[in-house]
Amino acid sequence: MGYDAIIVGAGLGGLASGVALAAKGKKVLVLERMDFIGGRCSSKRVDGWTMDIGCHFLFGCEHGSFGDAARRIGREIKFFHPTDYRLKVRDSMLEFDWESIVVTRPGSDTVTINTGEAYHGMMDHVPRPLISLARLMMTPLLPRLGKIASPIINRMDNITMKEMLDRYMTWPAVRDFGEFFQLAGFCTPSWLTAYSELMRTGLGFVGYYKPGKMKPAELMGYPIGGLQAIPDTFAEGILERGGEIRTGSNVKKVIIEGGKAAGVELESGEVIKSNVVISNGGIKETVRDLVGEDQFDRNYAEKIEKLVPGISGFTLRAQMDSKISDLELGFNIPVPDCEEYFHELWDRRIIGDYAPPVMLSSPSNMDPGTCPPGKQIILAVGSSMLHTDDDHNKIEKYAIESVDGIIPGFKDHIERCDLMTPKTYAAFGEDDAPVIGIAQSIGQVGKNRPSSVSPLKGLFFVGGEAGRGISGVACDMATNSGLACGDYILKKL
């Protein structure tokens, strides 16, 4: 049977490109080497527990790329939107629930700030006519804001996040949170992350926001049913429209004939023909291994090979014997110097013998159906590197200490836990097992970001490492990459 497009890899980028094509009546075939779909945005359901494989907190949600993709196939993905955030930097704790901020420091009184009162207090110093004018102008201008700001942002491609943190965040605790938060979003240390990516991502979310129709909290959330709900929704839409999805199908090579994509050959020896091949298997790995560098101009092949991957990470997944915390989303930064901590990881490839910074959440507090009644799931993610002389498994002990530092008693109520290290994520096939394809760093963003359109006719790349003009955070960025590539193919081919 003929296919309008073959998609290599069923990560969110690959599935989103399939959604874009299938929604317009195109016949697509998705080939996935693993026995499940979704890549790092997936879950396993075992004995009543829904355990996520990768990241566990998403941006954009139903108002962003996930909702866009779902609506194209007549579907809906529901999200829980957290209202309780907890941040601990060493001994200082901050809790935020959109209505108040509670700050607790050792040896000091607890301070509670009512966010509504604080906001109105600041607005009292702004002339009313100016506020009215701003509201009048911003609503119609929001859709155009990106185009207006784009030339300014492009000039920031060579400014690092470190420069901005050093300039504006001088209090050590705030500086450390900024360091960790930007790495959690872009998976690149601050001295490499391009500041322009923060600006582009911010504008992207402004574009999602609908003033007066939604709350800002709705731009962050967790999918009901676990992370697997997203790829499953995309896959159902593809299948309903006559597409096919095969798991356990490893592509050996992309067939190139006369400088054009002609199909793929599987490890089994099966050859499948199509004039369009979309790879969600990593741009470096596709050029080097699936196609072969000899098929490309030497300068292009060398440029792709030199792309720097993002940092890798670990996920501690704990099944608790009871519900011990109401936490929805939190951060714990116990290290004395976050920047030095990331230098040890990135430059010296050292896994320290101390509790690491972690971002943690409780999926079961956001969706009780993810675990048996009376139980709880707590996840914690942090940064690491695949290539190190240290033992990855020692991370588990220190990660547990880090979670226990913000949820006292955590380690005493663990019924079962496991640790997913960079070696686990290496099974997805990308060099260095990055959390997000290539680093969003100087020289790899904006006009320098690899295009989804390859030099070979009919060959395309999607995911966290491809799509000129695509920016954002993790899964949202990968989904946008796939949708944009699918739309381009429909328009051009």
Image (cartoon, rainbow, N blue to C red):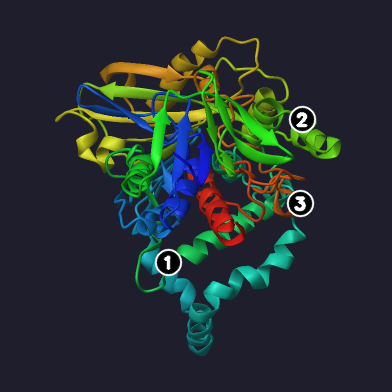
Q: What is the distance, in whole Å, between disc 3 and disc 2 at their CAs?
A: 32 Å
Q: Which mark is residue 159?
A: 3
Do residues under tags 3 and 2 come within 8 Å of each other at their CB atoms? no
In the picture, measured across the screen, residue 436 lies left or right of residue 248, that is right
Q: Is residue 287 above or below residue 458?
A: above
Image location of residue 20, percent across then percent down:
46, 54
Q: Is residue 150 visible?
A: yes
Q: What is the distance, in whole Å, between disc 2 and disc 1 at their CAs?
A: 58 Å
Q: Quadrant of the C terminus?
A: bottom right
Callout 3, which amino acid?
A: Ile
Q: Is residue 168 visible?
A: no
Which SS class for mark 2? helix
Q: What residue is pinned by disc 2?
A: 293
Do residues under tags 1 and 3 come within 8 Å of each other at their CB atoms? no
**First reached walking from the N terminus: tag 2 or tag 1:** 1
Q: Quadrant of the N terminus?
A: top left
Q: Which mark is residue 106?
A: none
Crowding around mark 2 (Cα neighbors within 10 Å: few <14, some 14 to 19, many 20+) is some
**First reached walking from the N terminus: tag 3 or tag 2:** 3
Q: What residue is pinned by disc 1?
A: 118
Q: What is the distance, in whole Å, between disc 1 and disc 3 at their CAs?
A: 32 Å
Which SS class for mark 3? loop
Residue that protrudes farthest toward the left in the picture: 373
Q: Give the total of numbered labels.
A: 3
Residue that protrudes farthest toward the bottom in the picture: 129
Callout 1, which amino acid?
A: Ala
Q: Is residue 50 above or below residue 230?
A: above
Which SS class for mark 1? helix
